[in-house]
Image (cartoon, grey):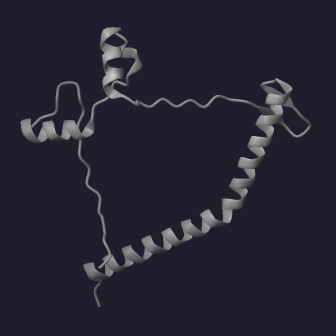
Amino acid sequence: MSTTIDDRVDQYVKIRDKIREMEKTHEEIIKPYKEALEGLNSLLLQHLQTMGVESARTMSGTVYITPKTSASVADVSAFWDFIISNNAFELIDKRANKTAVSDFVREKGMAPPGVNYSVTHVVGVRRS
């Protein structure tokens, strides 16, 4: 009895479903621990801020405040106008837009100069 492509696709779907089930179970198991850490994080941050310090050493370890930054563009036109008028190109990332590059390659048959372009293929499986 030989194995068919249908058998392999069936195996793939079953294994993928089992992984998702296990990941969901894992998320549910660790959820209360993550919530407890978030609560402790807030309490410790509040304590450091109340004390007016950036860190505190204890017998159990050192707690410290570390900045977490985020920058997103709210108004593309205003941001781009600022970049150009102030010659502030250091405020933007220098990377190729993969969708636009893919379109360019489709139209021109080659990548723009200075861009490494590649396509890899992976298998996708939809359940029946």
- Quarter residue 10 falls in: bottom left
Q: How many marks?
A: 0
What's the residue at 75%, 48% (across, down)? 39
**Vertical comparison of 47 with 126: above or below:** above
Looking at the picture, how far across and down is residue 116, in whole percent?
A: 24, 33
Outermost residue to the bottom: 1
Outermost residue to the top: 86
What's the residue at 20%, 37% (across, down)? 100
What's the residue at 31%, 17% (across, down)? 81
- Quarter residue 65 falls in: top right
Looking at the picture, how far across and down is residue 40, in whole percent?
A: 78, 46
Q: Is residue 98 left or right of residue 113?
A: right
**Vertical comparison of 125 with 89: above or below:** below
**Vertical comparison of 60 with 49: above or below:** below
Q: Is residue 44 left or right of residue 17?
A: right
- Camera-nearest residue between 14 and 30: 30
Q: Is residue 128 left or right of residue 19?
A: left
Q: What quarter of the picture does the C terminus occupy?
A: bottom left
Looking at the picture, how far across and down is residue 28, in whole percent?
A: 63, 66
- Quarter residue 123 falls in: bottom left
Outermost residue to the right: 59
Outermost residue to the left: 108
- Camera-nearest residue between 102 and 4: 102
Looking at the picture, how far across and down is residue 4, in whole percent?
A: 26, 82
Q: What quarter of the picture does the N terminus occupy?
A: bottom left
What's the residue at 26%, 78% (across, down)? 5
